[in-house]
Amino acid sequence: MPELPEVETIRRVLAEKITGHRIVSVSVHHPKPLGKQSVAELKAGLIHQKIQGVERRAKFLLVRLETGALLVHLGMTGQLFARTRGQKNPPGLPTLPDKHTHLVLELDRQAIVFFRDIRRFGRFRWLAPERVAPYLAHLGPEPLLPEFTVEGFRKALVGRTASIKALLLNQKIVAGLGNIYVDEALFRAGIAPQTKGGKLTTKQNLRLHGAIREVLREAIRFRGTTLSDYFDPESRRGGFQDRLKVYGREGEPCVTCGTPISKGVLAQRGTHWCGKCQPVVRK
DNA sequence: CTCGGCCTGCTC
DNA sequence: GAGCAGGCCGAG
């Protein structure tokens, strides 16, 4: 569910609310998100630790501790909520903790953090200091940092026969895009999602690089996209859903040319595009 | 590189 | 009951 803009929004809100607090108690209600880590190891890593800050790498969140970090990935339906003890539950949202709440962190000064994940595709675990970098080493460049260059992007696509849609979902090529923002970036760049990665022209490559950065920046500015499950740690919805140009707009007129938006399946994911603004070119 | 699997809940 | 959903991983 959450892609880079949503995770970045969560990071900002969470950092503001929990930095400087100390973890007082840890309770795990479902061990699946821990993977191979034991509940005991998680608890030992977190307990009594003071939170130094919250960072993001691709769609991962890193809650930095005095020693090591709590790593969180939200998968499709993961949510993080920061509340104060006794805080009234926002209307329309479940009372926490509910049956989908898998981790509860009680902090000092009455703060509480809940990790909730209906489908349980998400994960959380404690990482020792020396394991943080290796854990994230498989990820490609951060699209909003200077390390994401046009030249590097071009090289990553050379000779690739998979569709550009599949390649943009690959976190090793560029880190942080998901199904929504891939479709939106390809629309903005005027490139059909079916295009083979290695077939992009120099010009398309440049446009796509720019479009990726632009759509992500804009989506962060609007605090992400809420289709159904996404809420920030203060239970607020995002605002970018009203600005999507192709995602979820099958059959509706293209904002540029009026042609009905197409939908198909590519890289096993629902894919949306404008057949006229994103012509399939072969070269 | 592509596919199936992991999960639950919602909409046909 | 089937199909679909914002992600990722491992198998072949």
Image: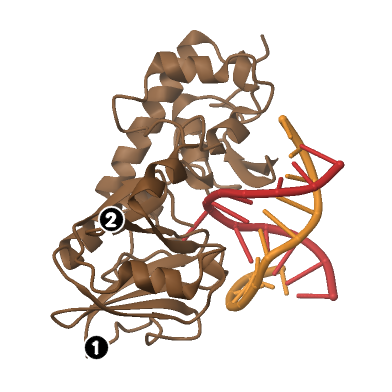
Chain colours: A brown, B orange, C red
Q: Which residue is mark 1?
A: A88
Q: Are marks 1 and 2 in contact (CB under 8 Å)?
A: no
* Residue A185 seen in the current view: yes
Question: Looking at numbered disc 2 in the image, what kind of residue is underneath it?
Answer: Arg
The answer for how far apart the CA atoms under marks 1 and 2 are is 23 Å
Residue shown at 56% from the left, 36% from the top: A170
Q: Earlier along the polypeptide chain: callout 1 or callout 2?
A: 2
Q: Residue under mark 2: which chain is it in? A: A
- Badge 1: residue crowd in 10 Å (few <14, some 14–19, many ≥20): few
Q: Which residue is mark 2?
A: A11
- Is A5 or A239 nearer to us in this picture? A5
Q: Is residue A115 above or below residue A207?
A: below
Query: What chain does badge 1 belong to?
Result: A
Residue A198: quarter of image? top right
Front position in the image: A257 or A240: A240
Q: Position of residue A210 (x, y in %)?
A: 37, 24
Q: Is residue A237 left or right of residue A283?
A: left
Asked whether, in this view, residue A243 is left or right of residue A158, the answer is left
Give the structural element (helix, strand or loop) at label 2: helix
